[in-house]
């Protein structure tokens, strides 16, 4: 997924593990789903795959681009996660919304998981673009859950057996990965306006400093296991 932005603004971002958890909440409607997913899984990886499949089912890509544009992140990401259990469809910004829903489900399932946001420069347009992933800790390793939508029109999810840093964007350079409890923790991106703001100048020393502090706090709060820290540096 690529997103091109043209507006300038700066927004301070504060870390709050509790607030972020609320922002990616899926609500009580997900209780039956998480019980079903847990009962059918025999490992963390299989559970994460099942969560990925559930997310694709709950948040399909719309067939009509014109219809989707009217709803582009029109609600907060947390509202989108909760509303997915009412049959709400996906906007064109599919990776943000899918990762947010996956994090909400994984949080209910007690799987150590957090958001990894890859930002890179598109060599065809020289605009900044991004893709969100879900990193999780399984069998002593940091792994990455990826959601995508192929040119052939097929939704998919996949697990890479390594951190998001090792994923190379197609047609992109200067890739940097930022991490947060969810997308709201990275430049306060909870709607399309904040997303536009973030992508004006996302790769800079200020963002890097904030990223280091977020990671330290996520380790402190138990969001990221200490054993995972060396694998995401």
Image (cartoon, rainbow, N blue to C red):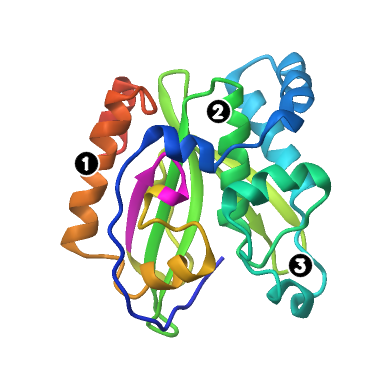
Question: Closer to the camera: disc 2 or disc 3?
Answer: 2
Which quadrant, please, contains the N terminus?
bottom right
Residue 107 numbered tag:
2
Is residue 55 depicted above or below 49 in this figure?
A: below
Is residue 97 depicted above or below 163 in this figure?
A: below
The image quadrant that residue 215 belongs to is: top left
Q: In front here: 88 or 140?
A: 88
Q: Residue at x 48, y 71 (%)?
A: 193
Mark before the other along the chain sequence, 2 or 1: 2
Evaluate if marks 3 and 1 touch, with contact meaning CB atoms under 8 Å apart: no
Badge 1 marks a residue whose secondary structure is helix
Q: In front here: 87 or 154?
A: 87
Q: Which residue is mark 3?
A: 152
How many callouts does the rendering have?
3
Q: Which residues fall within the magenta stretch?
A: 175-184
The image quadrant that residue 27 belongs to is: top right
Is residue 146 depicted above or below 124 in this figure?
A: above
Badge 2 marks a residue whose secondary structure is helix
Real-space Cα separation, disc 2 to disc 1, in angstroms:
21 Å
Q: Residue at x 55, y 55 (%)?
A: 96
Real-space Cα separation, disc 2 to disc 3, in angstroms:
32 Å
Residue 22 image position (x, y, % from top left): 52, 37
Q: Which residue is mark 1?
A: 213
Q: Residue at x 57, y 45 (%)?
A: 100
Mark before the other along the chain sequence, 3 or 1: 3
Residue 75 numbered tag:
none
Mark before the other along the chain sequence, 2 or 3: 2
Which quadrant, please, contains the C terminus?
top left
Residue 9 image position (x, y, % from top left): 32, 75
């Amino acid at each position: 997924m690529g997103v091109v932005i043209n507006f300038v603004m700066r927004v301070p971002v504060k870390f709050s593990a509790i607030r972020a958890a609320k922002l990616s909440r899926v609500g009580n409607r997900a209780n039956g789903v998480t019980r079903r997913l847990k009962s059918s899984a025999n490992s963390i990886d299989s559970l994460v795959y099942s969560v990925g499949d559930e997310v694709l089912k709950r948040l399909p890509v719309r067939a009509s681009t014109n219809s989707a544009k009217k709803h582009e992140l029109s609600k907060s990401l947390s509202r989108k996660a909760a509303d997915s259990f009412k049959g709400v469809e996906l906007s064109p910004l599919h990776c943000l919304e899918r990762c947010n829903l996956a994090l909400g489900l994984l949080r209910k399932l007690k799987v150590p998981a957090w958001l990894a946001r890859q930002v890179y420069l598109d060599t065809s347009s020289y605009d900044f673009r991004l893709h969100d992933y879900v990193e999780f800790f399984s069998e002593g390793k940091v792994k990455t859950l990826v959601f995508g939508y192929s040119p052939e029109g097929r939704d998919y999810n996949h697990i890479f057996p390594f951190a998001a840093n090792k994923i190379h964007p197609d047609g992109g350079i200067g890739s940097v990965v930022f991490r947060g409890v969810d997308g709201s923790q990275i430049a306060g991106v909870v709607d399309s306006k904040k997303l536009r703001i973030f992508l004006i100048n996302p790769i800079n020393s200020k963002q890097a400093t904030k990223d280091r502090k977020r990671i330290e706090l996520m380790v402190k709060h138990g969001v990221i296991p200490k054993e995972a820290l060396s694998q995401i540096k």
